[in-house]
Amino acid sequence: MKVVKFGGSSLADGPHFEKIIKIITADPERKIIVTSAPGKRDKNDYKITDLLIEYANRTLAHQDLSAIQEQIWQRYAAIGNYFSVPSEKMTRLKQILLDLPKKEYQIDDYLLATFKAHGEILNAHLLTQILQKLNLNAHFAGSGELGIEVTDNPQAAMILPDTYDKLAQYHLPAGYLIVPGFYGLTKQKQIATFSRGGSDITGAVLARGFHADVYENFTDVDAIYAANPAIVAHPRAINKMTYREMRELSYAGFSVFHDEAILPAIAANIPINVKNTNHPRLKGTMIVPAKDFQPANVITGVATATHFSALYLHRYLLNKEVGFTLKLLQIFYKYHISYEHMPSGIDDLTVIFDNRQFTAGVREKMCQEIRTELQPDSLEWIDDYAIIMVVGEGMRNKVGVMAKIIEPLAAQNIGVHMINQGASRISIMLGTKRKDAPAAVRQIYNNFFIQKAK
Ligand code: ASP
């Protein structure tokens, strides 16, 4: 049995619904279908999730709601019309959308989460109606019915392990099970969503809970590529990769698949197949356990992410000083700041942060406290920091990989501020200035893939 998840662009309008229905019905193994909210139809369009956030904000600000309600509803109405879904069924769906502001919410954050989740809830209802209209047996099941339980973080919930016990007890009905992605219920029965793009997580959780043979993830690209096509022209497609490679690459900006969605698949050893709704015959990319993978290349992919900053601390005899790092970590803890990496030398230490977590003034206060408490000889804050992640199971037992990464950068005068090799030895992380990151990715990609082909 396969769990199949469709992304927002695959469910953006009637013609796309037609494509996904062909996909679902082409393979009898495709039984559990997870929906996203309708995405953009073209690059100037809006995602329904973003419109729902606007709807929630206007509700909280007690503004007039009719225009935004109508804008959201028209997207669903157009899809319903395309399939001539009976008007009484559509009226019932519209009522769900209009009733959102009238419900009770524990706090505003749960209101926001509930509005957001309805992008997928309405879409799953709509798909169920359409399949029934086509005389196919389909059943809608939300998180309440299935027992998808999550932590109390309204916008960035994590799945609770009880979910898997509940799914084990759930009796799968005959026909298709249509499940809205992106959210679960807290113990207090409030809707909480995963972080953005989180419908992938729902699909992975169901694949694990229902022991699927494969988790198919349909999106709008033919495959996952070895580098970002916006940086490298026509990069090669990755046919097969491991879970670990995917995690490392998605951490550094490969956004095709949500990085948290890999964990349930890993726990149950379920292969993930990323495929294109518009070209479903193509094989796409398989993401598999390491035991099922024989690397054909030294590296599988190279990625970059630019939302980082770095703190550089220098102090002589740092290596002999007891408690220096402990005090530093206590300061981070006090300001609720998590760090990503901390490479160190004998007299210095660099700490790399995700800079999206800093609210106004926190960075300055934190640095001031570090100066006073730790008295470093020098403290430097680098704001325009990028990391480059070079990933490949094939580099584990290969000599000379580091040279092959660094040489083309040196040739182009690209400075490398940090090098960090993960303990698993399947990834090497470099730190560069943000402006150098795209050129660095191109150089590394060319040296491993283009030079080799010549
Ligand atoms: N609709 C949600 C978002 O835009 C979740 C998803 O598409 O996976 O983030």
Image (cartoon, rainbow, N blue to C red):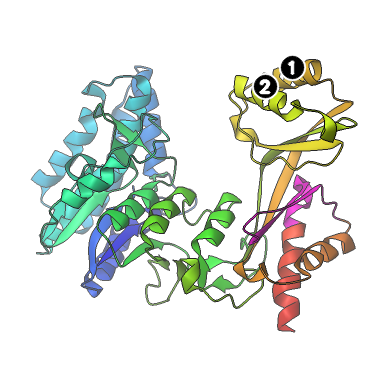
Q: Residues within 10 Å of mark 1 (few under 14, many from 20)?
A: some
Badge 1 marks a residue whose secondary structure is: helix
Above or below, comparing residue 89 to residue 403 in the picture: above
**Which of 338 and 81 lies nearest the eye of the viewer?**
338
Q: Quadrant of the C terminus?
A: bottom right
Mark 2 residue crowding within 10 angstroms, few (<14) / some (14–19) / many (20+) = some
In contact (CB < 8 Å): disc 2 and disc 1? yes
Give the image quarter of residue 175: bottom left
Up-down: is 86 above or below 60?
A: below
Give the residue drawn at x 35%, y 63%.
Answer: 215
User: Does 368 sit left or right of 133 as displayed?
Assistant: right
Image quarter in which the N terminus is found: bottom left
Residue at image coords 75%, 22%: 367
Q: Which amino acid type is marked by label 1?
A: Glu
Residue 35's place in the image compared with 51, above or below, is below
The reply to whether the magenta stretch includes residue 417 is yes
Q: Earlier in the sequence, mark 2 or mark 1?
A: 2
Magenta part of the chain: 414-438
Asked if one can make out residue 80 in the rendered structure from this viewpoint, the answer is no
The image's mark for residue 147 is: none
Side of 292 relative to 403 (left or right): left
Which three-letter amino acid code belongs to the residue tagged 2? Answer: Ile
Return the x and y of residue 358 as percentages of the image width and height.
63, 27
Total of numbered circles in the picture? 2
What residue appears at the point 61 percent right and 51 percent down from the top-left corner? Answer: 252
Query: Which numbered tag is attached to residue 331?
Result: 2
